[in-house]
């Protein structure tokens, strides 16, 4: 199956409109052509700087524009970040993602985040960061420090974007992705569904991602987690089948990308998650929090993986200790509680 970067909205909408079984068959066919269908890549996410973000993203409890229960915290010390990364490795994560509630990192912050990257990388983990917008020079600095992935979501379609965020433009986001790619890092970029958008907006989001010159290596698809105090706290829920369709279409459009079943899993049934894996999702976050919102505990994920016959994908750069930790966690899941990783 050849990769395409010229999808039209009409083509993508026609995929969304396929009979459900036909859509999942096409997605599963694309998935099996490029991945082991019974492996899922596992990451862990830590908030290294929480709250008081100057952006006005209507879904985000960390925005300083809204009154939520999220308290402002300063940038974590490097030693604490490394300790959390070590714990993540112990429960089987192969990638450690660090997120800061910034519009963009200031130059005074760069030496600290670069040191975090170097020390987490030294543990034998893949590294990922999401720090807001980047300049070309900042992207190069992170690449030099050893950063593997940079996360910067497009969130939604260009047409719906202005109803969700006004403090940065869609082009700002695309520019950051361009800087990341030019620096030689891998891209993690996806979006959020359930914001009140329509199907055409979901198609528009996926079109933007699939028509990048190089597809993102990782595509997180988030289900909105409604948080009290944000403007979207009372938006209507997205139908679960429509969410699975979004996963399937993402898999068809970007057949060689890891499609991450991301935020919102805490509210998803095992059956819904199983459908998402069948539709082509092959990446998740471990841990009971994603920055500030709930996520299933690692032990719960391992039990679901056991039911489905799913194994965790190994990081090819991992050492023997990492591989042994993953296998030990899988073997022990029925015999003892997993000391799961908790993001503070």
Image: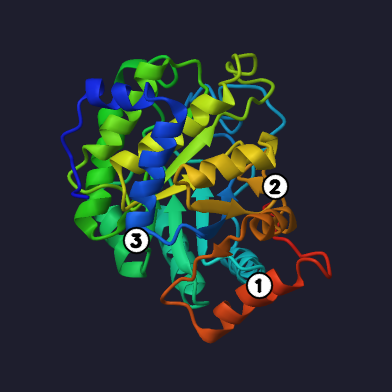
Place residue 139 in its image quadrant: bottom left
The residue tagged with tag 2: helix, strand or loop? loop
Disc 1 target residue: 90
| Nearer-N-terminus badge (2/3) | 3
Q: Nearer the observer, disc 1 or disc 3?
A: 1
Callout 2 touching callout 3 (CB < 8 Å): no
Residue positioned 56% across, 78% down in the render = 322
**C-alpha separation, residue under disc 2 versus residue under disc 1:** 17 Å
Q: Give the crowd class for mark 3: few <14, some 14-19, many >=20 residues within 10 Å.
A: many
Q: Give the crowd class for mark 2: few <14, some 14-19, many >=20 residues within 10 Å.
A: some
Q: Nearer the observer, disc 2 or disc 1?
A: 2
Q: Nearer the viewer, residue 242 or 186?
A: 242
The residue tagged with tag 1: helix, strand or loop? helix
Question: Does the rendering let one see residue 274?
Answer: yes
Q: In the shown orientation, is residue 262 left or right of residue 201?
A: right
Disc 2 target residue: 296
Residue positioned 61% across, 36% down in the render = 264
Q: Position of residue 140 (x, y in %)?
A: 26, 59
Q: Position of residue 181 (x, y in %)?
A: 23, 52
Q: Nearer the observer, disc 2 or disc 3?
A: 2
Disc 3 target residue: 142
Q: Nearer the viewer, residue 202 or 279?
A: 279
Q: In the shown orientation, is residue 79 left or right of residue 17?
A: right
The residue tagged with tag 3: helix, strand or loop? helix
| Nearer-N-terminus badge (1/3) | 1
């Amino acid at each position: 199956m050849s990769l395409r970067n010229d999808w039209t909205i009409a083509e993508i909408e026609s995929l969304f409109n396929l009979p459900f079984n036909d859509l999942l068959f096409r997605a599963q066919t694309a998935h099996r052509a490029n991945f082991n269908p019974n492996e899922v890549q596992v990451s862990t996410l830590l908030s290294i700087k929480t709250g008081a973000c100057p952006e006005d993203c209507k879904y985000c409890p960390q925005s300083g524009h809204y009154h939520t229960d999220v308290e402002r915290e300063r940038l974590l010390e490097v030693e604490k970040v490394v300790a959390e990364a070590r714990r993540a490795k112990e429960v089987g994560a192969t990638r450690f993602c660090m997120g800061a509630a910034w519009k963009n990192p200031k130059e005074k912050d760069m030496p600290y985040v670069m040191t975090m990257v170097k020390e987490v990388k030294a543990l034998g983990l893949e590294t990922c960061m999401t720090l807001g917008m980047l300049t070309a020079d900042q992207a190069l600095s992170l690449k030099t420090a050893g950063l593997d992935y940079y996360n910067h979501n497009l969130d939604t379609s260009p047409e719906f974007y202005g109803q969700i965020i006004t403090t940065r433009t869609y082009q700002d986001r695309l520019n950051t992705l361009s800087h990341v790619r030019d620096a030689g890092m891998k891209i993690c970029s996806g979006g959020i569904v359930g914001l009140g958008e329509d199907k055409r907006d979901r198609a528009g989001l996926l079109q933007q991602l699939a028509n990048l010159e190089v597809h993102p290596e990782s595509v997180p698809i988030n289900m909105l987690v409604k948080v009290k105090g944000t403007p979207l706290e009372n938006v209507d829920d997205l139908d679960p089948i429509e969410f699975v369709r979004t996963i399937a279409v993402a898999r068809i459009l970007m057949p060689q990308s890891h499609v991450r079943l991301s935020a919102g899993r805490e509210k998803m049934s095992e059956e819904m998650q199983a459908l998402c894996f069948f539709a082509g999702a092959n990446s998740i976050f471990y841990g009971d929090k994603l920055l500030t919102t709930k996520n299933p505990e690692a032990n719960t994920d391992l039990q679901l993986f056991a039911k489905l016959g799913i194994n965790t994908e190994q990081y090819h750069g991992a050492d023997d200790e990492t591989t042994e930790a993953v296998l030990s966690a899988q073997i022990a899941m029925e015999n003892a509680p997993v000391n799961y990783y908790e993001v503070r």
